[in-house]
Amino acid sequence: MHEWALAEAVVATAKKAAHNKQMREVREIAVKLGELQQIEREIFEFALQQILRQEEPLVRQAKVSLEIERAQFQCRACGWEWAFTAEQLSQEISEAIHFIPEIAHTYIRCPQCHSPDFDVVKGRGVWLASLKGVQ
Amino acid sequence: MDPRVAIIEQRLASIKKIIAVAAGKGGVGKSTVATGLALVLSELGHKVGLLDLDFYGPSTHVILGGLEGVQPREDHGIVPPKVHGIEFISIVYYAGENPAPLRGPDLTNALIELLAITRWGDLDFLVVDMPPGLGDTTLDAIRFLKDPHFLVVTTPSRVAQETVKKLVMLLRQVGLPLVGLVENMRRLSDKGQRFSDVRFLGELPFDEGLEGALGAPGRFLQTEFAQRLREIVTVSLQAL
């Protein structure tokens, strides 16, 4: 599952950041899940826990906190702002955006002027928000 | 922090050599050379992958053919399907035949996402079809691909050679290995001066039979173009 690949990436990044900050133990890994990528939260959380359990002591006991971030778009052509809603998309398009969120520019248009030229202002994908630990 | 970047090196660890096929401009046959290279290397018994990074104008799938109903398998990421024996990844799996109107940061994000989630098999060579020019994706590929060896494609035209000079300068400035230069679309009547500053690997003919062989690797490998490419691969690329 795709969520496992991203969970592996989160753990690899957390380890790297913890080493850089000379942490002895990571206690909490806070991750934002951008709504546009439509990550299956339960699968992602399970994957993170399974991967952490097999990791080095630095991160093995870390708790995971997940926060869903609503996806917001702004049109570069007319300035219109709108929120992402997956309901109007077919399963095939939803899946394509799930794998590569930038594919949104292929299928989604500004509701006001129909331009594909919009910013994903927030809520794109998986983001490591913070690490808490002891040094 | 963007978590994806840290995993890219691990994702590319199963690949022995990356050959990035690049050109300073579009229209020189870069995608045909990249796809042909992948097919010839595969024919010679190597394990080969082909990655199309030309997000605006992906075309290796047209040259390779055989993609009807084919999608990457989802398994702890995406596993590239084997198309004619080649592990193949392109944005067309997700954008289909539709345009992907992406600005610079979106191109970067799409590239990072693909590199972070694709689980390549054990490959002798990953051939990368680079986008034309020196824009975001070229710079990102230089940043994220593991020790790419650049193969530069030009044509006998002075217009193409002028832009190739700039690409070669950039690659030298960033210290990336340059395998050499291939001159594509050479006609018998061409007598132009060759770009002399880079190792010349060989010329590829303007092959009238190529168009009819697109999407049919068996026919493609019988073209004069493929025969000349085979010679270049045997002499210069297998030993990389």
Image (cartoon, rainbow, N blue to C red):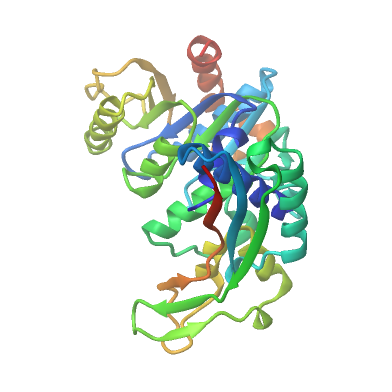
Place residue B158 in its image quadrant: top left
Extreme-front residue of the structure: A135
Above or below, B36 against A122 in this view is above
Does any portion of residue B62 appear in the rendered image? no
Residue B11 drawn at (x, y percent): 62, 36
> Which image quarter: residue B185?
top left
Residue farthest bottom in this picture = A112
Q: B139 and B53: which one is in front?
A: B139
Instruction: Identify the residue at image location x=70%, y=18%.
Output: B45
Q: Is residue B13 left or right of residue B66?
A: left
Is A75 drawn above or below residue B215 in the view shown?
A: below
Which image quadrant for residue B26?
top left
* Point 65% across, 83% down: residue: A88
Residue B18: image location, x then y, percent: 52, 27
Residue displayed at 44% across by 55% down: B107
Residue A115 pos. (x, y %): 42, 79
Question: How many discs appear?
Answer: 0
Q: Is residue B19 visible?
A: yes
B187 relative to B70, above or below: above
> Residue A15 appears at what percent x and percent y?
57, 40
Residue at 56% x, 25% y: name it.
Answer: B226
